[in-house]
Amino acid sequence: MTSKRHSKTLLHHWALLLCFVLTGCSKPVVVKTVKADNHRLEVSFTERAETLLRQDFPVSMPVAGRISRIDLEVGDPVRKGELLARIDVIPTQQEIEALRAGVEMTTSRRELTADISVEQAELIQANKRVESILAETARIQPAIDAATTALSNAQTEQARVDRLIAAGALPGRDAEATRLATDQAESVLAARKAEAEILTARLAEARAGAASVQARLNKRLAEAKSQAAQVSEALARKSQADYTLQKSRVVSPIDGVVLARFERGPKELPAGAPLLSLGRLQDLEAECEVLSQDALRISRGTPVFLDAGVAFSEPIRGEVRLKEPLGFTKRSSLGVEQQRVRVRIGLIDPPRGLGAGYELWARFQLREKTTLSLPRSCFVRFGQEYRVWRVTGDKLELVTAEIGLKGNNYWELLGTTIEAGDLVVSKPSDELSPDLVVEVESEPTSDS
C-alpha cells in the first residue's frame, strides 16, 4: 500500500516537472509594433482629374478671301502680333480703286444736281407774275361792277325818255342821245369783261408756268437726294473694302501655342471660317468630378495636389477655383448611380510638358496637422471606444485610447494614456490577451 502511494507521488512530481520543462521551452508570441510619435496627419480624398485650358482663342477669317498657306503646326509657339496667315489683297485693292472713282463721279453729279439756283430764280419770277395778275384781277372786278351799274342806269334813262317821247312830252331827238349812252355803257361793260377774261387766261398760264418750274425743282431735289444716297452707299462699300484691306493680315492675339489647325491653305474661304485655335499653357487648370458629399467638404481655395505618375517627381500644387452649383447624376464603373459635382482646380506654377487633356489624380487636402499619433491599424474598437495593445516590458497591456483627428493613415492621440515613445502593436489579432508574453518586432513608420 505504501509502495503504491510512493509511486503515485513520484508520477505526480514527474508530471509537474514535465509541465515546467514544456512551459519553459515554449516561444513567446511575436508581434510587430510601432512607436507613438509625432506624424503628419492628412484628411483628404482622391479623384481622377483632367487638364484643360481656362480659355482658348479661336482665329478665324475676318473677311472673305483667299488665304495664303499656313505653315504652323499644332504645338508651335506664337507671339502676340505674329503673322499667322495673309489674305490676298489684290482684288480688294482693285475694288477700292473702282469704288473711289465711283464715289468721286457720283459726288460730282450730286453737286451739279444739287445746284437749284436757276430753278429757284425761275420759280420766284413765276410766282411774281401770278401775284401781279392776281392784283390786276382784283382791280378789274370793281370796274366791271361800275360798268354794270352804268349800263343799268343808261337803260333805265332810255326807258324813261322813250315813255316821255311816246307821251309827246319830249321831242324825238332826245331818244337818240339816251340810246347812244346805253350803247356806250354796253361797250364799256363788254370791254371790262373781255379784259377780265384775258386776265383769267393769263393767270392760268402764269400758274401753269409756276407749277412747271416747281415740278422741275422737285425733280432736281429728288435726284439730288437719290444721288446723296448713292454717294453714301458707295462710301459704305469703300469703307468695307478698306476694312477688308486692313484685315488682310491675320495675326496672333496672344503669346501662346497652337492647339488646333483647321485649314492649311491656300484656299478661298468665307468670312468667319475657323483657321486656328490658340491657347496659353499658363492658363492650364484641371477639372474633376467629385461626389456630392465630398463637394460639401471643399470650398474655394481648398489645397489640391495632383499626381501625374512618374512624369513628375513632385505632385503639382493647385487649389479649388470653382465649385459648380449644379450637380448631376453619373453611373459609376460598377453601374451605381452617383451624384457628382464638377470642380475646377487652378494650377500653381504648372510644370513644362504638361498640356491640355492630360489625366491626373487630384488629392483634395481637407485638413492637415502634425501631432502625436498612431497608424489607424493599431486601433481596435470596443463598443463606443477604441483601444490599443501597448507592450510594457515583454507583456501586453490593453489601453483605452482617446482619438482626435482621423487622418487617412494616422489617427491623433489625445489625453495622457498613450505617450510619445510607447510601443504599440501595429496589427493586433484576436489571439492577443492581457499580460501575454510577446517578442517585439518593430515596423517602419511612414507619413500619413
Image (tube, helix red, strand yellow):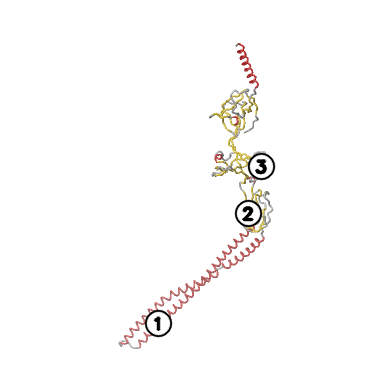
Pick the front one: 160 or 137? 137
Q: Residues within 10 Å of mark 2 (few under 14, many from 20)?
A: some
Residue 60 drawn at (x, y percent): 63, 54
Does the CB distance between marks 2 and 3 fall below 8 Å? no
- Mark 2 or mark 3: whose residue is earlier in sequence: 2
**Residue that numbered label 3 is attached to:** 351
Answer with the quarter of the image where residue 263 lies. Answer: bottom right
Residue in front for this viewpoint, 365 or 359: 359
Q: Give the x, y percent position of residue 285.
A: 62, 44
User: What is the spatial separation of the Cα atoms under label 2 and label 3, in whole angstroms?
Assistant: 30 Å
- SS class, disc 1: helix
Q: Is residue 71 above or below residue 220?
A: above
Q: Is residue 70 visible?
A: yes
Who is closer to the viewer here, 159 or 240?
A: 240
Say what amino acid the circle numbered 2 marks.
Pro
Mark 2: secondary structure: strand
Instruction: Give me the residue at 64% from left, 48% from top.
Output: 279
Which sits earlier in the primary sequence, circle 2 or circle 1?
A: 1
User: As shown in the figure, which amino acid type bears the numbered disc 1?
Assistant: Glu
Tell me the quarter of the image containing the N terminus.
top right
Indicate the amino acid at tag 3: Pro
The residue to which callout 2 is attached is 274
On the image, numbered disc 1 is attached to which residue? 186
Q: Which image quarter: residue 190? A: bottom left
